[in-house]
Amino acid sequence: MTSIELSEIIEDGSDVLIVLDSRKRWLTKAITGKQFHCHKGFFDFDQIMGKPYGISVKTNKSIELTIYKPIPSDFLKQIPHSSQIIYTKDAGLILLNGGIHPGCIVLEAGTGSGALTSILAKYVGSEGHVYTYENREDAYNNAKKNLERLGLESQVTMKFQDASNGFDEQKVDAVVLDLGDPCEIIPHARTALKSGGVITIFMPTYNQIERVYVQLEEYNFGDIQALELILRGIQLKRNAIRPNTRMIGHTGFLIFARKLVGEKDL
Ligand SMILES: C[S@@+](CC[C@H](N)C(=O)[O-])C[C@H]1O[C@@H](n2cnc3c(N)ncnc32)[C@H](O)[C@@H]1O
């Protein structure tokens, strides 16, 4: 039998993903002496304390629930939000194409609900940092709560500031923009970025792509790429494996570009 490490064990205060089926799942904390309740009954968290993630537990109505250790996409799907948050498929590509890596400094605007901020913060880790700008107070306060709930506040500096007035930071490795008018932020992003640094812009409409592309050329960015990710889920059912009937048809477009350095910058 393989030995079980401490990180595999559910403790008082551990985050747990409780799964009934592919549709019904809950993200919560396991608390000693408390119960988990859902429409299929309840169980005592004490029943799972000290046990490894991946176990199953029965409710008082004998319904089996599985307990998983949450992964970043679980947090993303459950984050309380008032504005549209980034989808996992787009967040994944932003990390890889956006020049983001453990230990790097990322500048983000707008924060929104802090969903993308949380993914960036997890990925840059304790050696890196995320600076994020939001100009709506309610969004700023909600994102602050979300980041505290995820225990990521030390890796993020939140600013209740309008990014169109410019950024305080310089020599950042990457800039990520997901806000209404990215064109007016591009000049400030250029000033804040290191030479060769990457800018990523998420935008929902075709109309914005051309304006952003032209602005990026004007402000001397190179290697400009625009793309859209289309994701199709597959139904997993014996003898009936096929694409799901329903899918999310559109989330947004992504533009990636890198800061060029001309003679006048040297
Ligand atoms: C679509 S939401 C961002 C969602 C975010 N990526 C997430 O995953 O939660 C856009 C946010 O940008 C903010 N915003 C718009 N213009 C801004 C600006 N000039 N400076 C700072 N924030 C801005 C809006 O208030 C809004 O909260």
Image (tube, grey):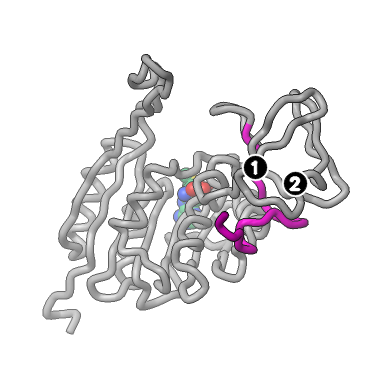
Amino acid type shown at disc 2: Ile
Q: Nearer the viewer, residue 73 or 255?
A: 73
Mark 2: give few (<14), some (14-19) or many (20+) Cα within 10 Å. Answer: many
Where residue 262 appears, as percent x and y from the top left, is: 13, 75
- Which residue is denoted by mark 2 in the rendering? 48
Q: Is residue 263 above or below residue 201?
A: below
Quadrant hosting residue 25: top right
CA–CA distance in space, label 2 to label 1? 8 Å
| Front in this rendered view, residue 53 or 31 | 53
Q: Helix, strand or loop at disc 1?
A: loop
| Residue 137 shows in the view | no
The residue located at (40%, 22%) in the rendering is: 235
Which residue is identified by label 1?
A: 55
Q: Residue at x 32, y 36 (%)?
A: 205
Determine whether 126 is above or below 217 in the image: below
Query: Where does the image place residue 20, in percent across and percent down from the top left?
Result: 63, 29
Is residue 76 rendered magenta in the image? Answer: no
For the residue labelled by badge 2, is the local secondary structure a helix, a strand or a loop? loop
Residue furthest toward the right? 33
What stretch of residues is rendered in magenta? 1-19
**Residue most extreme to the bottom:** 266
